[in-house]
Image: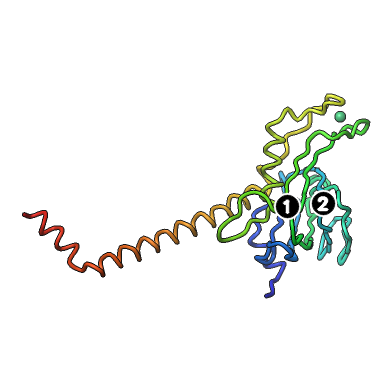
Amino acid sequence: MKTNVFQHLISHTGVPGITSLFPYLHPGAIVMGGVYSLNYPGSPEYNFHHTNDCEELFIALVSNGVQRPFGMLAVGARTHEVDNHTGPQESNPDAYTVALVIQRNKEKPPQREVFSIYCPNEECKKLVFRKEMDNFEGEEQPYYPEFKTVTVLGPDAVNEFNQSDRTCHSCGTVLPHFPIENMSWSLYTRQVRLANRARADYERFLANQSASKSALNSNPGAGAGHSADGGQ
Ligand SMILES: [Zn+2]
């Protein structure tokens, strides 16, 4: 199986785009994430820390105005800072980056990931919010697996953070709302769950069709007989 990472970008749902280039997300799978960031008017600026039990291999394929030169290859620390990679839109409106992030899933649980937000006050920097998840836990989609790093660690953690008081209990700084609305995570989550729901409805429709056909076949006169009975 092969894919073209640039063409794959077209199906991404927003910024930052991260989706699995191949439909393999099972235990032991090598997950090839296609990632991009792009500056545009109103593009989201954000910052959080990601902790991953699996090593992440990062390869910058192409970029503009970003400190990630062509072909840069790095193995991220187990806990690493994540931001939009492109800096503020006003300072570099043309910045973008296209990269691969590759990880090998664990064969057995747990496969732990943590989303955390630290206080932006330079003199504080204390942990304000933390959400941990195990990739082996939670609901599995029946037809198309979801990339839980995006669906669970993204929207679920961020919604929880946004609904909290967003206050650093060490120094009292109130952190800004995390701009989830403008990020691909929410759309991806909605769409992968819709794809599964629609496929399940379609399968149910087909099953109902074949059940009513076989009922008709086993009693071909059933329809006519019913109206004849009704007339008596
Ligand atoms: Zn603080």
Q: Any atom of ligand 1 within 8 Å of the CB at mark 1? A: no
* Residue located beneath label 2 in the image: 85
Name the image quarter holding residue 157.
top right
Q: Nearer the viewer, residue 71 or 166?
A: 166
Contact, mark 1 vs mark 2 (Cβ under 8 Å): yes
- Which quadrant of the frame does ligand 1 lie within? top right
Above or below — where is 179 with respect to 21? above
Q: In this orientation, which residue lies closer to the viewer: 144 or 21? A: 144
Q: Residue furthest front?
A: 108
**Please, what secondary structure does the residue beneath circle 2 have?**
loop
Residue at image location 6% in from the left, 54% down from the top: 232
Corner quadrant of residue 176? top right
Q: Is residue 214 above or below residue 130?
A: below
- Which residue is farthest left? 232
Give the vertical position of 148 relative to 3 (above or below): above
Residue for point 76% across, 54% down: 37
Residue to which mark 1 is pinned: 16
